[in-house]
Image: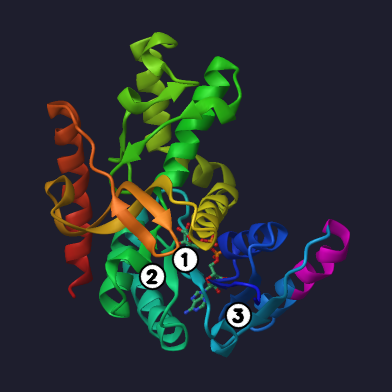
Amino acid sequence: MGRRKISVIGAGFVGATAAHWAAEKELGDVALVDILEGIPQGKALDLFEASPIEGFDAKVIGSNGYDETKNSDVVIVTSGVPRKPGMSREDLLETNKKIIESVVLQVVQRSPNAILIMVTNPLDTMTYLAYKRSGLPKQRVIGMAGILDTARFKAFIAMELGVSVEDIQALILGGHGDEMVPLPRYTTVSGIPLSQLLPKETIDRLVDRTRKGGGEIVNLLKTGSAFYAPSAAAIQMTEAILKDKKRILPCCVYLEGEYGLKDICFGVPVKLGEKGAEKVVELDLTEEEKKLVAKSAESVKKSIAELKI
Ligand code: APR
């Protein structure tokens, strides 16, 4: 049995770091693609040259074309421009729309059986565009956002309580924007409800910081956006798929009635396995939570309408 194949489109901060995690975890061989001449080749060679030191066996190839991506099992799409301070994710729509349309067609021609993991922002809208343009079944076009948003919430809770990040379980629904819906009611520390460990005002503060978590990094970096946590999240999804782990993780998928939403890509808990997003898990929500979900869905719908497709 040969190795699995992961292609990463976009060899910038998120893409190159995703390639790094994938190779180091020996999830498969990696093809890194970018339009910039020399960049994917140089980063791929540099990463492969790290393998004798770190002790991983994975081929890493860089290219400006798509032939090297042929027959990929998973394709992670990170190509596109990132945010700068003062920009919202929506400000990226026009530029990234063109990039995603061309990339998705090239990818699917060569890897018709692949599962696409979308990372480019505005995330929910780009996932919708990729789903519509790729012609792939909805289970195989999945956006990365919920794991990242949830990881930020978990990190802030761990910092506040001074406990291990490993003991925190949390869940966030909705679009990957400031209107995402963190669910403190479904958040526990080793099974202990968060509400028993922190006062409401503190939880509200952490929720607010989570909602603006991407912007916090953009304001610090000034020249780009987050990349360690986003790439780690995309790789957690890749691993769940390639190892058929059936993990329950929040991801952005095309909905056809779940949560009362239709014709939208939106963040919900899904079962991730070898077939992709194998099942959407529906939760019982309070009236207040339903209102927040509706508000988040409204802003995603507005963004999708901007695509004019
Ligand atoms: N095909 C392939 N690669 C492309 C294309 C294209 N048509 N257009 C742009 N790229 C490449 C750029 O050359 C660049 O190397 O995509 C890469 C993007 O990398 P960065 O600018 O470093 O951006 P990054 O921080 O990696 O973010 C990428 O992920 O989190 C999101 O909002 C973020 O949309 C952004 C994306």
* Disc 1 to disc 2: CB gap under 8 Å: yes
Spot occupied by residue 24 in the image (x, y as percentages of width and height): 72, 58
Query: What label does residue 81 carry, if any?
Result: 1
* Disc 1 to disc 3: CB gap under 8 Å: no
Q: Residue at x 51, y 43 (%)?
A: 219
Q: Is residue 5 left or right of residue 198?
A: right
| Cα separation between marks 1 and 3 | 13 Å
For badge 3, the amino acid type reads: Leu
Q: Earlier in the sequence, mark 3 or mark 2?
A: 3
Q: Please name whichever residue, 136 or 131, is drawn nearer the observer in this view of the structure.
A: 136
Q: Is mark 1 within 8 Å of ligand 1?
A: yes
Q: Is residue 300 left or right of residue 233?
A: left
Q: Residue at x 48, y 21 (%)?
A: 189
Q: Is mark 2 within 8 Å of ligand 1?
A: yes
Residue picked out by circle 2? 96
**Label 2 residue SS:** helix
The residue furthest front is 1
Residue picked out by circle 3? 36
Queried whether the magenta region covers residue 52, the answer comes back as: yes
In the image, the segment drawn in magenta is: 45-54
For badge 1, the amino acid type reads: Val
Magenta: main secondary structure equals helix
- At label 2, counting other C-alpha atoms closer than 10 Å, the crowd grade (few under 14, some 14-19, many 20 or more) is some
